[in-house]
């Protein structure tokens, strides 16, 4: 992490978030969902695959099994067949059926709106819980996924590789009301500009605030050609 005061780091983090808000005014959860249950399942399915792939898979899944009771009673082989395109389909089928059973047996078929309850569900960790709380219930949270962890480190906002520590570091730097959207903006930036292998530094709106600037493509024209979305 940069050798800077807590106040300086806080101001820099908030300025970064403001700049990213201007760059990505459409930042949002990129998983399609209509209710908390659909978002919970979609987020579990998004592990080790893309949101696009999940969005192509969930319409059939939810048409067949629209609620926890239906999914809990599903034939595992049918679930696996539907989920096969998402990868790790056997484990994912067990996870979504297990969490569905837990919702039916312990929460009356409803997705709970508390982190402490969500993380007790099979296959649900803090990252998934914060996605659901922030986007389905409006409860702010930092989603420390791989993009957020990577960008927080590159931007000098954390010196940890532990997701829980990264989450706590970012929560300490940003206003609580902004946690969910700040996560979306970092994820958008990681997917569209600050790539893992070769970031488009020459086209990055927060390059002047980034201690890692220059590690990627610095030519503005070539960097601009790398941008996605």
Image: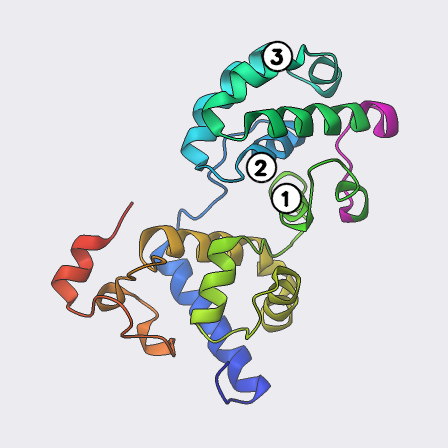
Q: In this view, does 75 lie above or below 34?
A: above
Using the image as rendered, state which of residue 43 and residue 175 is in the foreground.
43
Q: How far apart are marks 1 and 2 (CA)?
A: 6 Å
Residue 106 in percent (x, y) is at: 87, 29
Q: Is mark 3 on a helix, strand or loop?
A: helix
Q: Where is residue 140 in the image (x, y as percent from the top left)?
A: 65, 53
Q: Quadrant of residue 122?
A: top right
What range is drawn magenta here?
A: 104-115
Query: Residue 19 placed where, x, y %?
Result: 39, 66
In the picture of the structure, the residue carrying the numbered disc 2 is 43
Please report the residue visible at 38 percent of the width from the left and 56 percent of the height from the top.
189
Above or below — where is 1 with respect to 108?
below
Disc 1 residue crowd, few under 14, some 14–19, many 20+, Cα 10 Å: many
Can you identify the residue that label 1 sits on?
A: 128
Query: Pointer 3: what residue?
Result: 77
**Counting residues from the N terminus, which is met first, the one under dot 2 or under dot 3?**
2
């Amino acid at each position: 992490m940069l050798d800077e005061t807590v106040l300086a780091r806080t101001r820099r983090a908030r300025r970064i978030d403001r700049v990213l808000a201007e760059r990505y005014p459409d930042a949002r959860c990129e998983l399609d969902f209509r209710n908390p249950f659909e978002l919970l399942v979609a987020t579990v399915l998004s592990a080790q695959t893309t949101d696009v792939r999940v969005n192509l898979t969930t319409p059939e899944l939810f048409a067949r099994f629209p609620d926890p009771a239906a999914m809990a009673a599903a034939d595992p082989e049918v679930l696996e067949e539907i989920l096969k395109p998402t990868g790790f389909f056997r484990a994912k089928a067990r996870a979504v059926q297990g969490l569905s059973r837990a919702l039916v047996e312990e929460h009356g078929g409803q997705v709970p709106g508390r982190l402490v309850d969500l993380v007790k569900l099979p296959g649900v960790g803090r990252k998934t819980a914060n996605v659901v709380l922030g986007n389905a219930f409006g409860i702010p949270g930092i989603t420390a996924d791989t993009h957020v962890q990577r960008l927080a480190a590159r931007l000098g906002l954390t010196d940890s590789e532990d997701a829980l520590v990264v989450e706590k570091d970012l929560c300490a730097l940003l206003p609580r009301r902004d946690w969910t959207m700040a996560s979306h903006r970092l994820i958008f930036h990681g997917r569209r500009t600050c790539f893992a292998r070769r970031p488009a530094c020459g086209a990055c709106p927060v390059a002047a605030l980034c201690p890692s600037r220059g590690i990627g493509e610095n030519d503005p024209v070539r960097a601009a050609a790398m941008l996605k979305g």
